[in-house]
Image (cartoon, grey):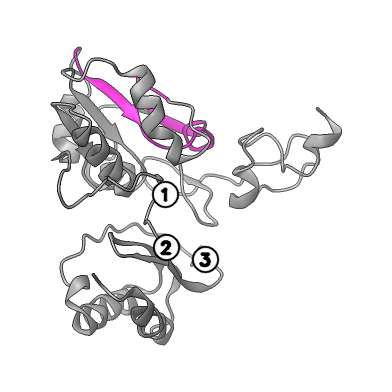
Amino acid sequence: MLDIESMRGPVLDLACGHGIKGTILLASEGYNATLAGLPEALAAFRRDVAAFHPAFANLHWGESWHDTIPFGAMKVRLKAETIRMKQQDVDVTLSRGTHVSPQDWQDLVQQDDVIVLDTRNDYEVAFGTFRGAVNPELDHFHEFPQWVKQNLPDKTKPVAMFCTGGIRCEKAAAMMKAEGFDRVYQLQGGILNYFSQTQDQKNLWQGSCFVFDDRVAVTSDLRAIPAPFCACSGSTLTTEAIKFPAEPFASCGRCIPNHC
């Protein structure tokens, strides 16, 4: 098992040394990162972090472009799980779904017998999702296993799942495979990779895609949407405010108690 405690400081120093901002999550089961910086700085960081530890040598890196850095600081956090599921028996190294390229995904999700499943939280789905996708209406990702047990009794039907960057699907697919589901497919690289590779040429996406940074959400051409406003106060909504579960993007959260 990796000593993530000893890895935290050097990884943070490498990122800060290259002027990179964002968040890296370190867990014994794997890693997750969303980073921003100049192209040459990110390339240098990828080279240096792979040289620092072989665990970082063969990671999948997705890319999108923005005019400014949409993060305020650089953080490296230690986690028990990269994505919290609260199921200790889920091991992404033992079982996983079949990765489907963005190009093949376009054909897969249009098949009549396939359940297209959005594994993201409800406030994210409110911004946009694939046409015809099932929304489990999750407040938190750890509710996903129970939802599957209650709503997907037929384990022989093919399930095609997706999330923002593909990380949540790694755990969701592993859980479903461990539960005995026969055919579990996951969108390789998630929605953002789908946008990058296909530009949604077949118009399968509806709306925008919520992202966890100051852009709030992006369109299928990976452009940031105009910042949404609170319906009550008129103030610009930040990413953290939008996560308020009672009102996904209509309110800043502070004014909800006065209007409920």
> Which residue of the protein is positioned furthest toward the front in this rendering?
89
The reply to whether callout 2 and callout 1 are in contact (CB within 8 Å) is: yes
Which dot marks residue 33?
A: none
- Left or right of 52? Residue 121 is right
Task: Work out whether residue 61 or residue 50 is closer to the camera in this orientation and state it.
Answer: 50
Compared across the picture, whether 141 is left or right of 94 comes to right
Q: Which residue is mark 3?
A: 71
Question: Where is residue 226 drawn, in percent x and y?
Answer: 57, 45
Tell me which corner region of the image, top left, top right, bottom left or bottom right, holds residue 46. Answer: bottom left
Query: In the image, what residue type sits under mark 1?
Result: Arg
Say which element carries label 2.
loop
Q: Which numbered dot is residue 84?
A: 1
Residue 204 appears anywhere in the view: no
Residue 224, position in %: x, y? 48, 49
Write down the residue under mark 2. 79
Q: Earlier in the sequence, mark 3 or mark 2?
A: 3
The C terminus, quarter of image: top right
Closer to the chain start, of discs 1 and 3, is 3
Q: Where is 25 relative to 152, above or below?
A: below
- At horizontal 26% and vertical 79% (from top left) the residue drawn is 49
Q: Residue at x 20, y 64 (%)?
A: 59
**Image: 85 above or below 157:** below
Which quarter of the picture shows residue 39? bottom left
Look at label 2 and name its amino acid: Lys
Q: Say if 112 sits above or below 77 in the image.
A: above
As measured in the structure, the alpha-carbon distance from the residue carrying label 2 to the one carrying label 1 is: 9 Å
Part of the protein shown in magenta = 113-135
